[in-house]
Image (cartoon, grey):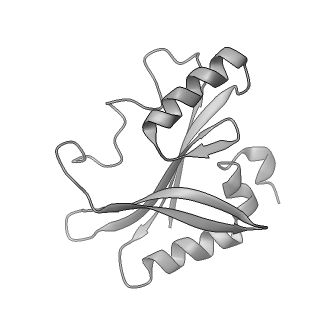
């Protein structure tokens, strides 16, 4: 299981935007149409997390990836909605950071089960996009 979190300062990262042509999920993403879908993952306590599920092809081995964006404490999967919310959060100063969160595991018959088990075990931490103050135990 791999976890990747990239944290950006909202409005202070000139040339290093969270939603950018240069930010790729995998090296050959441009010009490809990977298998993907949107899921609502149960975090417990009646909370759901929407993620974009992507099957990432790799030489000899594929990966199942769940990814989403966080602006402040709000999670989103639609890049256009993220851009709109970034603007609103910057103008209203309602968030000071944003992040890309990615969970990945080798693609096999139990890949989705492993991701679900990890999310269930780490629900509170995941709900915050792995914010340090929520992930201490």
For the C terminus, the image quarter is bottom right
Is residue 131 depicted above or below 127 in this figure? above
Q: Choose between 124 and 91: the one closer to the eye.
A: 91
Residue 54 makes an appearance in the image: no
Is residue 113 depicted above or below 118 in this figure? below
* Name of the residue lying farthest toward the bottom: 109
Tell me: 95 left or right of 25.
right
Residue 64 makes an appearance in the image: yes
Q: Residue at x 49, y 47 (%)?
A: 77
Give how far across and how far down residue 68 sits, in percent: 51, 49
Q: Residue at x 53, y 27 (%)?
A: 84
Give how far across and how far down residue 36 sits, in percent: 34, 60
Q: Residue at x 38, y 29 (%)?
A: 20
Q: How many marks?
A: 0
Is residue 97 depicted above or below 106 in this figure? above
Give how far across and how far down residue 62 sits, in percent: 29, 68
Q: Residue at x 79, y 67 (%)?
A: 45
Tell me: 116 left or right of 134.
left
Q: Choose between 87 and 61: the one closer to the eye.
A: 87
Give how far across and how far down residue 92 sits, in percent: 71, 18
Tell me: 99 left or right of 92.
left
Task: Kindly indicate the quadrant of the structure image that contains residue 99.
Answer: top right
Task: Kindly indicate the quadrant of the structure image that contains residue 120.
Answer: bottom right
């Amino acid at each position: 299981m791999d976890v990747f979190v990239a944290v950006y300062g909202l409005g202070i990262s000139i040339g290093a935007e969270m939603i950018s042509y240069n930010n790729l999920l995998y090296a050959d993403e441009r010009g490809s149409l990977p298998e993907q879908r949107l899921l609502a993952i149960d975090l417990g306590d009646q909370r759901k997390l929407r993620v974009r599920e992507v099957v990432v092809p790799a030489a000899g081995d594929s990966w199942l990836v769940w990814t989403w964006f966080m602006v402040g404490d709000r999670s989103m999967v639609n890049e256009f909605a993220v851009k709109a919310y970034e603007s609103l959060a910057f103008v209203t100063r309602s968030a000071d950071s944003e992040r890309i969160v990615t969970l990945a595991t080798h693609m096999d018959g139990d890949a989705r089960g492993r991701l679900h088990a990890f999310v269930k075990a780490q629900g509170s931490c995941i709900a915050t996009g792995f914010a340090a103050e929520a992930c201490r135990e």
